[in-house]
Image (spheres, grey):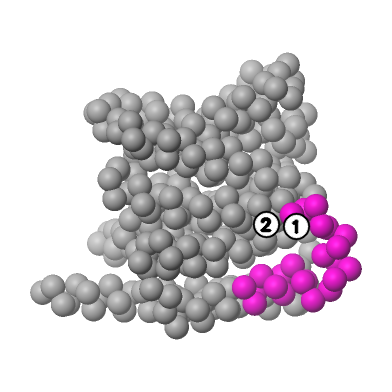
Amino acid sequence: MRLRARRIAGSPVASVLIGASLWAMIGPTYALIQDRVAIDEVTLVTLRAAGAALLSLSWFGAGDRSSLRVDRSDVGRMVVFGLVSVTAFYLVLIYAFRYSSVAVGTLLLYLAPALVTLGAALWLDDPLTRTKIAALILSFAGCFLIVEAFRPGTLSANIVGIGFGLASAVAYGSYSLMAKRLMRQYSAGTLMVWYLAVGASGLLVIKLAVSPTEWPSFGASAGIALYCGLMITILPVAFYTYGLQRMPSSEASIVATIEPVVAMVLAFWLLGERLGPIQLAGAVCVIGGVVLLAAVGRRNRVARVQSHE
């Protein structure tokens, strides 16, 4: 039993699925916090990023600090990585939730796999196979159904939320592409510390510019920073990055489309957001895309292992 558990935990697909499931808690977590604490969106995401940055710096900084150093020529890339993947992403995502809903905001986020798959084909020599195309079609057919894109009135009523959702997809997709390139030279720990530290700094600057004195109590701030920093940031990033290191970025991004399905269930269970039959059919499509890609990816990895024996 222990051996089997280790195999499951060590599977790249399983790691991505665990990371995506933890990320699915972001929307419900934000909603529940704002329902109980007087806190605005910028302050909330700033506390989340700051908590994650401090936790990662404490953990990795306690070991070999030299492992956190980067070449001067790469500092600019690390800054862009953090500002896009944390500062911009955290802001546009929470406003997507605010102006649409947790379920819809999360699903719009999943235009990212198409962007990652195309970007990986262009810049990372990751071939665009029939399997990936089929998985994308299934996943995005599911997203189309879930957001009810066939009803123009529904979309026009949420145009602001949709705009933020599209922006979140671009920012989210950039993580897989930029991280995959940087992983060729740096460890996952180095990337995590740098992108969280830079991203949290960017959010803190924005926070101090728009509402420098509006903070929850110290206890509430510390609790939010600790919980959000660990449960919906550090842990999902660690699981997702583990999988990303061991599979193509396009595959990891498509497998992670399980997140909107989990987010839908949590939104229904915790927040009372209703799911219709068409949206449930969309969820089935998303899961189908994940299963298809996971099965083929597993077969390809087994074939590679056997070829080296």
Q: What stretch is highlighted in magenta?
A: 140-163
- Is residue 161 a member of the stretch shown in magenta? yes
The C terminus lies in quadrant: bottom left
Relative side of 246 to 165, left or right: left
* Residue 248 in view: yes
Relative side of 277 to 263, left or right: right
The N terminus lies in quadrant: bottom left
Task: Quickly name the residue at label 2.
Answer: 166
Residue at x 46% of width, y 27% of height: 54
Report, in whole angstroms, how far the alpha carbon at label 2 lies from the one at label 1. Answer: 6 Å
Residue at x 83% of width, y 58% of height: 158
Relative side of 224 to 233, left or right: right
- Is residue 79 a member of the stretch shown in magenta? no
Residue 251: where, in percent of width, then height? 43, 67
In this view, 48 is above or below 12: above
Q: Identify which residue, 128 or 34, lies in the foreground.
A: 128
Magenta-colored segment: predominant secondary structure: helix
Residue at x 42% of width, y 79% of height: 129
Q: What's the amino acid at mark 1?
A: Ile
Residue 186: where, in percent of width, then height? 30, 43
Residue 162, image quadrant: bottom right
Residue 194, image quadrant: top left
> Pointers 2 and 1 in contact (CB under 8 A)?
yes
Task: Quickly name the residue at label 1.
Answer: 162
Relative side of 72 to 79, left or right: left
> Which type of secondary structure does the marked residue at label 2 adopt?
helix
